Amino acid sequence: MEKRTRVIVYGSSLNMAGVAVSLKADSNLEAMWIDPHSPNCRQYLYEHNPAAIVYDLSDPPPDVDIQLLREQPGVMLIGVDPDSDEMLVFSSRSQQALSMSDLVSTIRQLSARTLQQLNGQNAGTGKGVET
């Protein structure tokens, strides 16, 4: 049996309940729903080693810290806003930065990728982004 990707849905709203149900319907995902008000919430996030933690952007973000992101590289925090059909993705992927030029290079690469994405989204609208 193929290993399923573990996703934790973090929140107690009706929107998050719907997200959890939808994700559970995907046979490639192992979706777990956690109430942020539960006493062991933080421990649960650490113990279950998720690939992603999905939360409602209108709520406070999950109680995770830099230590969790370092211990579990690759974890994505995905904020969703059902009202605007928007999703905001934070990644804990790390890169080595041995010098200031490494940092500058990373910033340039990521900002260039962002500009490409913005220009692609605005193609044909006359709203291109200039560098």
Image (cartoon, helix red, strand yellow):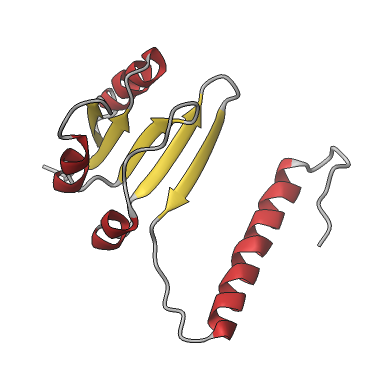
In the rendered structure, the answer to whether residue 126 lies left or right of residue 22 reads: right
Determine the image quadrant of residue 39.
top left
| Residue occupying image coordinates x 26% and y 35% | 29
Which of 124 and 10 lies nearest the eye of the viewer? Answer: 10
Determine the image quadrant of residue 41.
top left
In the rendered structure, the answer to whether residue 5 lies left or right of residue 48 reads: right
Which of 61 and 129 lies nearest the eye of the viewer? Answer: 61
| Residue occupying image coordinates x 56% and y 83% | 100
In the rendered structure, the answer to whether residue 44 lies left or right of residue 66 reads: left
Q: Quadrant of the N terminus?
A: top left
Q: Position of residue 72 (x, y in %)?
A: 25, 57
Residue lying at the far top in this picture: please name it: 14
Picture layout, residue 76 above or below residue 35: below
Which of 88 and 121 lies nearest the eye of the viewer? Answer: 88
| Residue occupying image coordinates x 75% and y 49% | 119
Picture layout, residue 63 above or below residue 96: above
Q: Position of residue 87 (x, y in %)?
A: 52, 35
Picture layout, residue 13 above or below residue 45: above
Determine the image quadrant of residue 30.
top left
Q: In this orientation, does residue 125 appear?
A: yes
Q: Quadrant of the C terminus?
A: bottom right
Q: Position of residue 96 (x, y in %)?
A: 42, 78
